[in-house]
Image (cartoon, rainbow, N blue to C red):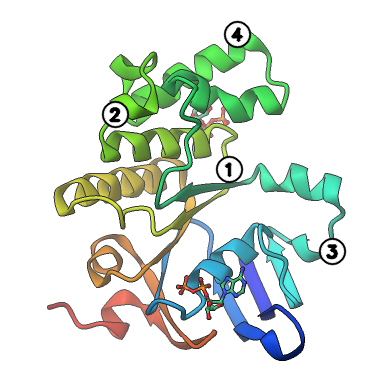
Amino acid sequence: MIELKQISKVYGSGNKKTTALSGLDLTIGKGEIFGIIGHSGAGKSTLIRCINLLERPSTGEVWINGVQMTRLGKKQLQKERRRIGMIFQHFNLLSSATVYDNIAFPLRLSGTPKSRIDEKVKELLALVGLEQHGSKYPAQLSGGQKQRVGIARALASEPDVLLCDEATSALDPQTTDSILKLLLDINKQFNLTIVLITHEMHVIQSICDQVAVIHQGGIVEQGPVANVFLKP
Ligand code: ADP
Ligand code: ADP
């Protein structure tokens, strides 16, 4: 369902060029939890941001469900992006909006009717276990609760893919495990494809089906987690 073909990304120009990705190919199947692991600077963040074209690849093609994302104009891209949710290391919530309004935000942007928004936000609050917290502000929540809001907001437009950019790196080990469990539940419940980047082996081993190891902008190893990494 996700296919990256010969993706390269070069930042800067002249003698200040940095090659973040070079000729990278990757195929991710529907319903998979696909982990991408690598050291700092390997190109993980650039790679995941190329999937939803937050970063435009310098060369190569990004295909999602048979649509070539790299070919789309601005307007079409905006529409197609609703099929791709994303969560972040530092949550990226609106601090002046309540939990409810953070989750409702993408629904309001897409012009969803008010009654449907209310129904959907309540459903999402229940899904992530925050029924009692809709009227709070992000500053009143723990890190794990903030990431639950991030997940609910990402799922509001019922995406086919969820991209997770170091989503548990700011959380303690116990909270990390509860967020990973939630991601696994959501993957099973909606057959949602999840792509996650991390520098933590534990994250890969606890929920991923497939893993790719990225080094200096290229995939150096790939396969089922049990084949690539022996269990400790
Ligand atoms: P990772 O997420 O694995 O740490 P990144 O994708 O952030 O790796 O970075 C890959 C390489 O690209 C690094 O050398 C980094 O310095 C460089 N890079 C990332 N973003 C930019 C940018 N906006 N401008 C210039 N260089 C960048
Ligand atoms: P439908 O055919 O109505 O979409 P589904 O079984 O796909 O039925 O969904 C059942 C419920 O779960 C619906 O209320 C829908 O809004 C919600 N749902 C489906 N997919 C997702 C998703 N990826 N994220 C959040 N909620 C979802």
Q: Is mark 1 within 8 Å of ligand 2?
A: yes
In the displayed structure, 68 sits above or below 179; it is below
Which numbered disc, 4 or 1, marks the residue that appears first in the sequence? 4
Judging by the rendered image, the residue that carries numbered circle 1 is 159
Q: Amino acid at mark 3?
A: Arg
Which numbered disc, 3 or 1, marks the residue that appears first in the sequence? 3
Q: CA distance from mark 4 to mark 2?
A: 26 Å
Q: Secondary structure at mark 1?
A: loop
Judging by the rendered image, the residue that carries numbered circle 3 is 71
Judging by the rendered image, the residue that carries numbered circle 4 is 115
* Residue 171 horizontal/vertical position (percent): 25, 50
Q: CA distance from mark 2 to mark 3?
A: 40 Å
Q: Amino acid at mark 1?
A: Pro
Which numbered disc, 2 or 1, marks the residue that appears first in the sequence? 2
Query: Which quarter of the figure is the N terminus placed in?
Result: bottom right
Q: Is residue 206 left or right of residue 138?
A: left
* Residue 231 horizontal/vertical position (percent): 16, 77
Judging by the rendered image, the residue that carries numbered circle 2 is 141
Q: CA distance from mark 4 to mark 3?
A: 35 Å
